[in-house]
Amino acid sequence: MIGAGPNGLAAAIVLAQAGLQVDVFEAEAQPGGAARTLALTLPGFLHDFGSAVYPMAAGSPFFSSLPLRDHGLEWIHPPAPLAHPLDDGTAVMLERDLGAAEAALGEDGKQWRRLMGPFAEHWAELAPEVLRPVHLFTRHPVLMAHLGLVGLPSATAIAEHWFHSARTKALFAGLAAHSILALDEPLSASFGVMLGATAHAVGWPIPRGGAQSITNALCAYLAGLGGTLHPSTRIENLAAIGKYDVTLCDVTPRQLLRMAGDRLSPAYRRQLEKYGYGPGVFKVDYALSNPIPWKAEECLRAATVHLGGTLEEIAASEDAMRHGHHAERPFVLLAQPSLFDPTRAPQGKHTAWTYCHVPNGSQVDMLDRLEAQIERFAPGFRDCILARRVLTPASLESMDANLVGGDIGGGAMNLRQFLFRPTRRQYATSATDIYLCSSSTPPGGGVHGMCGYNAARLALSRL
């Protein structure tokens, strides 16, 4: 196994459960990939390097089947999954309970329930279907057909068709912007629908102690199965690891070409060379003296806050990014985990985790624009800053080679790569003993482990 991110560890666990001897080689000293927790600012402040809030991990069919709680993983559910502040000093709140969400969204409440309810109420049936490769046959054709009807269009089309209030449209736009697509692109609505549904089905929890708690639990369970982790072992060429029956790679196509190019067919190499990476992110972690002073105090009920104003503003921000520009008022995703998890900061102090979308490999300093968006909804925020750590796309990639150009999704999520990710072979390669299992394979980005699970199941079926 090459790579100890969530997908690599998931694949390793599936193989070890089947009785195979498994070695996991990880380039960094600390396993986890983008699911790591690091001291990025001041002593005593713990920051999630990559992801910070975990609806897909909590709702993952594979992770849910593992006794991760026995290995220290504890989910913390904030009172509300999400807050979306507006310029009038109020915030649109996404409540976890579907009935409470219906009441909170007023004139659009019934429509919100009609849109999200079927998927939230049938998450146990939906999750295994959407977290595997695109396929013609399904055990739940009506549910999947309904998802196709509301997920394949653009986010702006769905928002305008389903909702009347600008407040609800803004809420849905923020959810859909997680797609890192322009909101008028096909498939962007699917992210809004899926994230909204998970908020009601499983919540948007944070792990006590940070993202590292997920990784540590997976590593501990793998060790119990006899798997061996080799940290600080960067594999530049697969020939360096010796002879194994099968090798699974939690890497993107660019890394696979570098480490296994001579073992892959020329035609397959050409397919990988065409793989497209998506936009990057510009990330900032903060050590704070106080909680963020939101104008809308209800923002303190949520670990996740979307900063972007109206649907039109968020759409303009994401459209700029998709066309190689840098938005003057970028859509900012912010997490404030220390409000609910005191292990993240010294007593009385806090952390914040933020990023905005930028073109892949961007070298533009977005700090002033990002902080202006926070100040817009929380005047006095800058006065709370004790220290900050800026992570550009280049610095993110230097700390995790899979984040190519700052791309946190493992590749662009356009229609072609949604159907064929990274090629028609998906997890298989032209070499019968080499498989891909990173977020560059179906179902794509997110901490759910299902790319690794699916790839390992395929490898086992062929052994």
Image (cartoon, grey):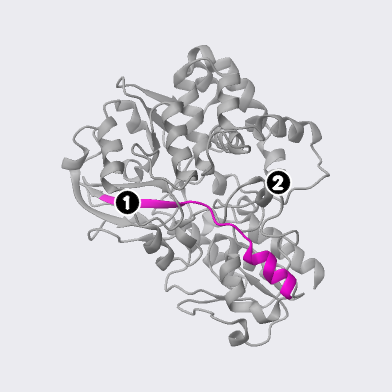
SS class, disc 1 = strand
Left or right side of 21 for 160: left
In the image, 374 versus 346, the foreground residue is: 374
Residue 307: x percent and y percent?
37, 34
Q: Nearer the viewer, residue 427 or 104?
A: 427
Can you tell which quarter of the image residue 227 is in?
bottom right
Which residue is rendered at x = 35% and y = 25% of the image? 86
Q: Which is more toward the observer, 26 or 338?
A: 26
Observer able to see residue 77:
no
**Residue for badge 1:** 284
Q: Residues within 10 Å of mark 2 (few under 14, many from 20)?
A: some
Q: Find the residue positioned furthest to the top.
A: 107
The answer to whether residue 275 is magenta is yes
Write down the region rendered in magenta: 265-286
Name the residue carrying label 2.
128
The residue under label 1 is which amino acid type? Val
Of callouts 1 and 2, which one flags the residue occurring earlier in the amino acid sequence?
2
Say whether residue 189 is left or right of residue 15. left
